[in-house]
Image (cartoon, grey):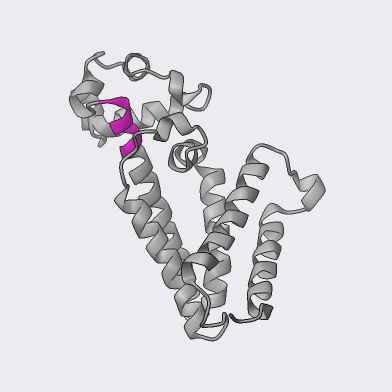
Amino acid sequence: MMAEREGRGRSMPDVIIATFLELMRTRNPNSITFRDIAAAAGISHMAPYRHFRSKQELLNRIGDVGFGMLAQALEDAAARHARDPRLQILAACRCYYRFAVDNPSYAQVMFGTDRELWDKAEPLPALDRTRAILLRIIYHCQLSGDLPGGLDEKEVLGLLWAHVHGFTLLAANRVLTEREIGPPEAFLEKGVRLILAGLEAAPRK
């Protein structure tokens, strides 16, 4: 089975990750064991242990892969508005929402909606890359004058991230629905614009 899977262009670690993410569609990730993954993938029950020393290592890999995907999507979104940093911020926020909607299993692992998954999580290089991209976008927005230069980039990122992530969770759990707020991305963008306007109008310390 391993040779058959790899012959189709996927390595065994990729098969294990894809199977785990597929099982997450209908099961709590805490309840999924390596034996469950092996049975669903049609591989030896020992195969997952040959590639991941523990389930936490598997989760770390999934989180890092997911943040790598998000980082690249953010880079692409920013590149489409290379001459307009303010539009880069709006595009990055929409990109974050779309990523979570299109990749719900990755998002659940990445953002730790179940804290037990992250009790022993290791630092993820791709998460640092994601933060760096977002901070760079905010910095360029300050350089262009679209945001006041005296603001702390990390504080601005925290405000925007809290809004986008909070909205994304509420929408994913159908606490906020399109019937109540209209098109989700338009609602999200309205909130981002209000935050930016408030930052522009706030008195400097």
Q: Quadrant of the C terminus?
A: bottom right
Say which residue appears at 76% left-offset and 47% top-offset: 178
Tell me if residue 14 can be seen. yes
Q: Residue furthest front?
A: 205
Q: Is residue 149 left or right of residue 178?
A: left
Splitting the image into 4 quarters, where does residue 172 fall?
top right
Expressed as whole percent of the image width and height from the top left, the position of residue 24 reads 47, 27
Q: Quadrant of the N terminus?
A: top left
Say which residue appears at 51% left-offset and 81% top-offset: 142
Q: Residue furthest right?
A: 180
Expressed as whole percent of the image width and height from the top left, the position of residue 179 reads 81, 46
Q: Work out whether 41 lies above or below 87.
A: above
Expressed as whole percent of the image width and height from the top left, the position of residue 186 reads 70, 60
196 or 180: nearer the viewer: 196
Tell me if residue 80 can be seen. no
Splitting the image into 4 quarters, where does residue 200 fall?
bottom right
Q: Work out whether 123 lies above or below 36.
A: below
77 or 140: nearer the viewer: 140
Expressed as whole percent of the image width and height from the top left, the position of residue 183 reads 73, 54
Q: Is residue 66 left or right of residue 26?
A: left
Say which residue appears at 33% left-offset and 38% top-offset: 60
Magenta stretch prevailing secondary structure: helix
Say which residue appears at 37% left-offset and 41% top-offset: 63
Magenta region: which residues?
54-61
Query: Is 153 contained in the magenta span?
Result: no
